[in-house]
Image (cartoon, rainbow, N blue to C red):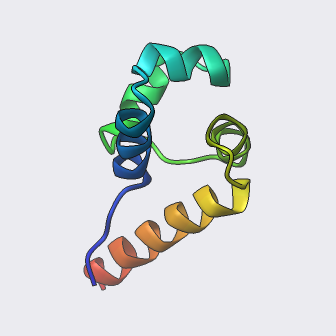
Amino acid sequence: MIAIHPGCTIRDELTERGWTQLDLAAVTGRSAEHLNRIINGKAGISVDMATRLGAAFGTSAEFWLRLWGAYRLVKLEETT
C-alpha cells in the first residue's frame, strides 16, 4: 500500500480553491509555518488541526484524522 500524507490533500484543496498557505493560515488561525510543515509532510494532523481543516474546507475532522491514521499505519507497517 502507498502512504499518502494528508499534506498532499491539503495542497490539492488549496489549488482547487485558488488559496495560498497564507490564506489557509488566516482561515484556520494557525501559522503559515506550521501549515507548511504539514503540507510538506514534516508534521502530522492533531485533533485540533483536523477540526480547523474540517471547518476551512467544509469537511469533517474525522476525514482528516482518518487520512492521518491511514498514513501512519502504512508507515508503521513499512518498518515492521
Judge from the rendering whether residue 7 lies leftward or rightward of residue 3; answer left or right.
right
On the image, the x and y values in percent for residue 21 come to: 42, 21
Q: Residue at x 48, y 73 (%)?
A: 70
Q: Residue at x 36, y 45 (%)?
A: 12
On the image, the x and y values in percent for residue 72 come to: 44, 68
On the image, the x and y values in percent for residue 38 come to: 42, 38
In this rendering, the answer to whether 7 lies above or below 2 is above
In this rendering, the answer to whether 33 lies above or below 17 is above
Q: Nearer the viewer, residue 76 or 46?
A: 46
Residue lying at the far front in this picture: please name it: 17
Quarter of the figure with residue 41: top left
Q: Nearer the viewer, residue 41 or 8?
A: 8
Which quadrant, please, contains the N terminus?
A: bottom left
Q: How many numbered discs sit on the rendered protein? A: 0
On the image, the x and y values in percent for residue 8 come to: 34, 49
In this rendering, the answer to whether 36 lies above or below 60 is above
Which quadrant, please, contains the C terminus?
A: bottom left
Q: Residue at x 53, y 23 (%)?
A: 24
Q: Residue at x 67, y 52 (%)?
A: 59
In this rendering, the answer to whether 18 lies above or below 64 is above
Q: Nearer the viewer, residue 73 or 20?
A: 20
Judge from the rendering whether residue 80 lies leftward or rightward of residue 23; answer left or right.
left
Quarter of the figure with residue 63: bottom right
Judge from the rendering whether residue 10 lies leftward or rightward of residue 77; answer left or right.
right
